[in-house]
Image (cartoon, rainbow, N blue to C red):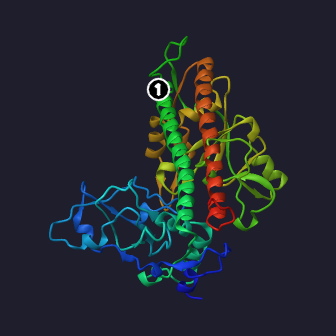
Amino acid sequence: MTASDLVTDTSLEKPDEWPMRTAASFNPFITSGSRGWAKYYADHGDLFMRITNLKRHRIKPDLSDRQHVALPASEKEGLRTGLRNGDILISITADIGIIGYVDENVPTPAYINQHVACLRLPADQVSPKFVAYYLASSEPQRRFIEMTDVGAKTGINLTTVGKLTFPCPPLVEQEAIAEALSDADALIEGLERLIAKKRLIKQGAMQDLLTAKRRLPGFSGEWDVVCLKELVISHNSGVYKKADLYGRGSNIVGVSDIHSVDCIDGRLFKRVPLTNDEKKKCTLSAGDLLYAESSLVKEGIARTVYVSNDGEDTCFAWHTRRYSVDNQRIRSDFLCYFLQTHASRKHMIDNCIQTAITGINTVSYFACPISIPTIPEQTCIAEILTDMDAEIQALETRLEKARQVKEGMMQNLLTGRIRLV
């Protein structure tokens, strides 16, 4: 089976009245982006879109990382590669088949580089947004991934882009489907923006409350500053298990998991068989703290989480280290938040060891300075930040549900299982 065969697969389950058409059957404009434009890179100018601006989970381009170009008047290549509203973007090298859709949110003039193809379909015959959503759905994406697996790592050509197939319900139905999916995307994007805003608010609150820049009502006096090691009762590293043993057994948190959670709260991470001695050594208790002893990037080193009551009995793996603290002097949740402040993170990053991966030893980690208010003030601060975390977590749960709803809509609407018209 060739890459072209995979792209032109017509085995989709769909209504009989939805013919499968190729992009080429609409006599579209198809091109790829410009080469050798690095010489035109500029701090300001026209948008120059790359594969990094395309994301598999959405058709809206990600413009958070922008490259600009300043084209001289003599450069005519821009006439060919300039983007218009309604253009469909497709990655054609390396990570093949990532889809983007150009609308009014993409500032123009805008151009694409040679790793991205532009498919411009006649909007009076077919809805480009419908086609973009279809190409970004699970079945076409599965075929794109298969294309890479069968040896299309160097890319697909523009002829293959023209052979891309998609169902063609009546135009009014295409537009209704595209609008429904756009509404689902708008809900997702709104939740993402709200979560980002809440995270910034929390970060600001942390910097104010954990540095005594802002004091809560009823509290005053200087905070003690001590070395973290003075607060630690005990610490030990996690258990090493070979990768092929994972799949069943005890719930175990690994170093990569620490970067995606704020606390160990009973959720399932991975499973691995453990002996009784291993369980005794690496089973977490409520109030423990756990940090990453290694990281692929230095910004992630020493990321620390705490163990809630629900997180008891979770085990921890190699490259993580558990420690307990004197709860008469410091709350573990307060300490966990404190270790996220700019000063604490700077200490960890400045004292890490960089080789093939980034690491930190116990001497450096436990040398971090910690500012300690009274336990009542710690409690109030921790409760405020915990409430913020709970609000963010609730929004993230809504976001995950919205993404699942959209995925279900795509599977049903783009295959005709559910009809809107």
Whether residue 403 is visible here, answered yes or no, is yes
Extreme-top residue of the structure: 218
The quarter of the picture where the N terminus appears is bottom right
Where's residue 156, x and y in %?
A: 46, 81
Residue at the spot x=75%, y=46% of the render?
314
Whether residue 301 is visible here, answered yes or no, is no
Residue at the spot x=73%, y=47% of the render?
267
The quarter of the picture where the C terminus appears is bottom right
Where's residue 221, x and y in %?
A: 50, 13
| Image-based side of 27 in relation to 275, left or right | left
Please give the residue where the numbered disc 1 appears in the rendered image. 208
- Height in image: 403 above or below 174? above
Q: Quadrant of residue 325?
A: top right
| Image-based side of 251 in relation to 53, left or right | right
Residue type at mark 1 is Asp
Q: Nearer the viewer, residue 109 or 340?
A: 109
Q: Nearer the viewer, residue 185 or 145?
A: 185
Q: How many marks?
A: 1
Extreme-bottom residue of the structure: 1
Where's residue 45, x and y in %?
A: 24, 56
| Image-based side of 412 in relation to 285, left or right | left
Q: Nearer the viewer, residue 99 or 210?
A: 99
Q: Nearer the viewer, residue 305 or 29?
A: 29
